Amino acid sequence: MQSKAITPDQYIDELPEDRKPVMQQLRKVVVANLPKGFKEVMGYGMLGYVVPHETYPKGYHCNPKDPLPFFAMASQKNSINIYHMAVYADKNLYDWFVAEYPKHCKSKLDMGKSCVRFKKMDDIPYDLIGELCAKVTVDQWIEMYESALKK
């Protein structure tokens, strides 16, 4: 379910009461751990973190008017989801995350290409997500992204 919120604060405010504290905590962890240079935005109906055009003027290849996406989070019907593009782009980062996940969570990892779904709100590994967010700088993400485009 995509939000029509225009700002991250509006997005959080419009969430159901049981989801607000979870998304607020997730947002706090992400903001505290993302390397300098990423910008918080609303994109694709989700709360997102991007490389702004001031840093990467080419933008996202699918729509160059959009900034380069890096991380997003959303409250969906049956889960809280995070989307970390570098996990999809970097096999070493993916392998690290998959190996670390069981050390932080009791539940089985529910993961797509870049999406991790959390159906149990009390089982979200905030520390692990913070560590994941801190692992890739803006420059490293741009390098990964451009090398993937060349393939």
Image (cartoon, rainbow, N blue to C red):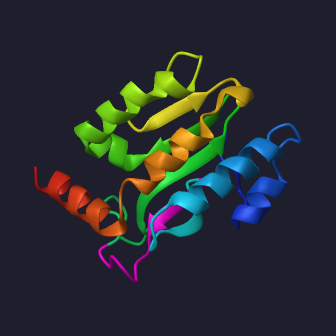
| As drawn, 136 above or below 59 | above
**In the rendered image, which quarter is residue 57 located in?**
bottom left
Whether residue 86 appears in this view of the structure is: yes
Q: Is residue 77 left or right of residue 34?
A: right
Return the residue nearer the eye: 144 or 76: 144
**In the rendered image, which quarter is residue 6 located in?**
bottom right
Look at the image and say whether residue 49 sits in the magenta stretch. Answer: yes
Q: Position of residue 35 (x, y in %)?
A: 45, 66
| As drawn, 56 above or below 44 | below
Return the residue nearer the eye: 76 or 129: 129
Q: Residue at x 20, y 61 (%)?
A: 146
Q: Is residue 104 left or right of residue 80?
A: left
| As drawn, 75 above or below 50 | above
Q: Which residues are magenta?
A: 45-58
Residue extending farthest left: 151
| As drawn, 19 above or below 111 | below
Return the residue nearer the eye: 6 or 21: 21
Q: Residue at x 36, y 67 (%)?
A: 138
Look at the image and say whether residue 127 sits in the magenta stretch. Answer: no
Q: Is residue 142 left or right of residue 20?
A: left
Q: Position of residue 101 (x, y in %)?
A: 47, 27
Q: Position of residue 12 (x, y in %)?
A: 77, 54
Q: Position of residue 14 (x, y in %)?
A: 83, 52
